[in-house]
Image: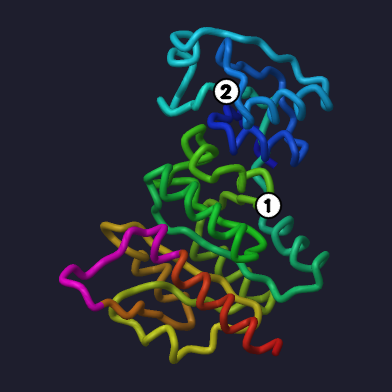
Amino acid sequence: MEPRELTIEGRNAVIEALRAGTPIDKLFILDGCQDGPVATIRREAKKRDVYVKYVSKDRLDRMSETGRHQGVIAYGASYEYSTVEDILNKAREKDEAPFVVLLDGIEDPHNLGAIIRTADQAGAHGVIIPKDRAVGLTAAVARASAGALSYTPVARVTNLGQCIEDLKKEGLWFVCADMDGDLMYDLDLTGPIGLVVGSEGDGVGRLVRSRCDYVASIPMKGNIDSLNASVAAGILAYEIVRQRFSLSE
C-alpha cells in the first residue's frame, strides 16, 4: 500500500467520504452556510467525532486545490492506493466475475474522477492506473468522482502491460477501446474482463494494445472521430453491464 494525503472538496464527495468511513482529520465549512447538504455533512461529522471549523470564503478559496469547493473542504488522515489483489478480492467477496477498468495515460483529473464514478456505478471492482505519465489521486480527482473514490479501489502499477499479463493468469481477458476495432455489439464482453481505455490524444498505447484480446469500437455518426475518454469508458462499461444482465436473464 502507498499512503497519500487526501484533500476532499465538494459537498457530495465529503458526504460520501464520511459515510464510507474514510478517515477525516479536519473539516472546514463556510461560515454561515446552513443548507441541506451542509446540515447532512455536519450530522455525519458529529457521528464520527470529526473536528469541524467554520471559516470565511476567502480562507476556503486559499485552501482549495480545485477552485470548486462548494463551501466544504475535508482533510483525510491518509489515503492508501489499493493493490491489484485487493481488486480481485473484492470480486471474490461478491462472488462475481472480475470487472476491472485499466487506464492508459489519462492525464486530466476530471476524466479520471468521472471514470472512477462510472466504474462504481457500473459495478466494476476497481480501477488500475500507471504510475508514470498519468494523473494520480488528487483533490480534483476526488471531487470529480463525486464520492465514488471512497468505494472504488484504485491501484497504481509500474507497468500496465505486465499487469495485463499477470491478470490473464487470473482468468481475465481484455478489450481496449479504439475507433479501428470491431463494433462493440459484435463482441462477447461477458465473463472476467478488463476494459482498457486510453487518453483522448493518443488512445491506448501500442504495447498495451498488443496485449489486449479484443479491440472494440463505439458506433459514431457525427463529424468528429473521437469521444472524451470518460464518455468512451462509460459507453463501453455499460455495454459490459448490458451483456452481463442479458446473460443472467
* Distance (Cα) linking label 1 and label 2: 27 Å
Residue at x-position 80% and y-position 67%: 94
The magenta-colored residue range is 221-233
Question: Which residue does the numbered mark 2 point to in the structure image?
Answer: 73
Residue at x-position 65% and y-position 52%: 152
**Chief secondary structure of the magenta portion:** loop
Question: Which residue does the numbered mark 1 point to in the structure image?
Answer: 83
Quarter of image, res 229: bottom left
Q: Residue 82's x, y, as percent? A: 68, 48
Q: Residue 50's x, y, as percent? A: 77, 20
Residue 59 against residue 11 in the figure, above or below:
above
Q: Please, what is the three-letter code of the amino acid marked with disc 1?
A: Thr
Q: Is residue 223 magenta?
A: yes
Most foreground residue, 225 or 11: 11
Residue 173, numbered label: none
Going by the picture, which residue comes out furthest to the left? 223
Quarter of image, res 170: bottom right
- Horizontally, is 138 left or right of 80 in the view? left
Viewer-nearest of discs 1 and 2: 2
